[in-house]
Amino acid sequence: MLFDLPKVNFATFLFILLNLVILYTIAFLEMGVAKKVLAGVSAISLCGLGFVALDIRKCKVYPDQGFIDAARHYLAVRSLYVIGKVMMRKLEKATKDVKTSQREFLLQQIKENVDTEFSRDMQLDKVKSVKDFLQLYPLTRYPDYSRYISRMISGERKVLTSEHPIIFAVTSGTSGSSKILPMLQKQTKLFFFEGISVLYKCMVEAYPKTKLLHKDLKLFYTPNWRYTVDEVPIGPNSASPDRSKGLLHIYTTPPVAYEIRSEPEALYIYLLFALLDPHVGMIEANFASIIYNAFCTLESNLAQLADDIEQGQINPDLKINEAVRDQLQSLLKPNPGRANEIREAAQTGMVGLASRIWPELHLLLGADSGTFDLYGEKLRYSYCEGVPLYSPIYAASEGLLGINIWPHQLPSHYLLHPRTQFFEFIRENLMDEENPPTCLMHQVREGCTYELVITNPSCLYRYRFGDVIKVVGFHNQCPIIEFKYRSGQFLNVRGEKISEELFYDTLKGTVTKIWTNTTLADYCCVESVALDGLDVLKGFKTSQPCYHVFIELERKDGSGDIRSVSRSQKTMLDDALMVQSYPYSSFRHKGSIGPIQVHIVPRGTFMELRHFMLEQPSSASNQYKVPRVLHNQEAVKFMFDRIID
């Protein structure tokens, strides 16, 4: 067969194809009607194959890439685009009647799982309408499901879900302890068809170079899975190499490198092989912070990486399994020309480095919502200047929530997806109530802030998972939202409840607009109560409850980090927060809360915190987010030990 010949080049392929068409034409003149129809279909198919072959040739960017490899890459991305166009039409239809779309989703979800023990316990078989559902079933939180999920992990079937999970997803635990949630095959399909395919279609149309057959630098890591008694994996629900095997050929990283479990070593190897490829078209990760950390690592190790490329070696200091090292080493050969290109790219500084190393780089993919905006801005104005950052998806361990179909728009907004969850909304002023009334998708108002409540395919019903969003507009009847903060990420020592969003905006405004020649590199906070029982300097402990803020700063001119600020500058942050929050101001003036304690930490501290947190058993690189409010006492001690001012 033609495609069993891996050495067939493009010219030979077209020559064979042309001869087949000629033979069909000659034979066509001597055939009966039925045979002519069959021959005509075959000829059209051959012509279509010829068009595909020409398109593949047009999209190739690697001169030495074989036709079969190019065709494999081409089919992977083109089929995704076609699926995306189909699913976009379905989404458009759903957004024009969200009330009906949501009702159909909810009732189908209940119907598919009516034979479970949970459904019988909750009498969900009595639900015949959305109204029934809201009247009969209360709002829920994780403890309402934990005992059912524990039994599923023990191997019991049809407890919470009718379909048995393909994975038990462990949440990141950023705003509290980690939770374990069932993930069904249905959710994986929804994520791919309703989310990924539509987003790829939007991405290609917004950034046409995406359809070229560039390889991408994909920053994700293989988790340390645990398993249930019936061998269902327990771990992070985000994309990972072992769950994306069909796509690994489109990435710059050799598949064997994904066997490296230590993030520092794995990232070094990812960067090494990406640097070897001058045609990289896209850099992709779950969060903008992961991309930013990768560039910080690149900056710190650039000289060694260039030396490795020049000599065609794997850095001997890396702690890598010898079998993996040998396989990686077999893929390398000395490349002094590329090493010199990389060194020259770095000579003019770090601003715009990405485009100088990879001239064809046209897109970064990673979430930049909420405080991830901090890393998005730093990428746009430093390492990746001139390269757009697209935040495509709004998702959680609970499933797909929304998609960003406006790639060029900033800040990133998301269309809540009416075909993937049943959504309810709690008004912000009612969030403290245990069972407040909710609004539905067709009832929310633009400009209002809500806590999201979901009913999802893995049978979390009317589930409060903690995300707070703002409705910023509508697409047809469907809400467009902006992610604001996690409800568990409050600073709250006297009932004042300073949200993550409010504190971040105040801190960012103070640092960038009031402090001179200063930009915010990263930060986190600690409530003073967390110091109880900790071995820290007595001067850090105060009689009044207060906030401790750890800040990593950089100079605007890029000349290095800032290792101290004046007492008056620190006071400016406390003053600014009093202006922004009346409850905080009131408690401060009454003496119920002490002034903010600002602590400067050296450059690289938050990278070290990342590595420290990832050493914890339940942590996963693909899900890591800087905890803006630290509760883990070991992490609190870690930060206090790094104060330099």
Image (cartoon, rainbow, N blue to C red):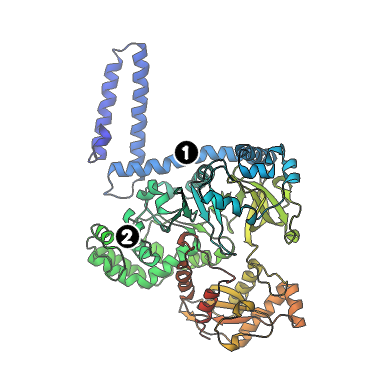
Q: Position of residue 258 (x, y in %)?
A: 36, 57
**In terms of image quadrants, where is residue 507?**
bottom right
**Residue 407 versus residue 469: which sits nearer the camera?**
469
Q: Residue at x 50, y 60 (%)?
A: 623
**In terms of image quadrants, where is residue 318?**
bottom left
Disc 2 target residue: 273
Q: Nearest to the eye among marks 1 and 2: give it.
A: 2
Going by the numbered disc 1, the residue's amino acid type is: Val
Disc 1 target residue: 82
Mark 1 and mark 2 lie on one chain; the one further toward the N terminus is: 1
The label number, if any, that marks residue 348 in the structure image = none
Going by the numbered disc 2, the residue's amino acid type is: Phe
Number of callouts:
2
Answer yes or no: is residue 386 visible: no
Dot 1, how many residues are within 10 Å of its Cα: few (below 14), some (14-19), or many (20+)?
A: some
- Per the image, label 1 sits on a secondary structure element best described as helix
* Quadrant containing the N terminus in the rendered view: top left
Answer yes or no: is residue 78 visible: yes
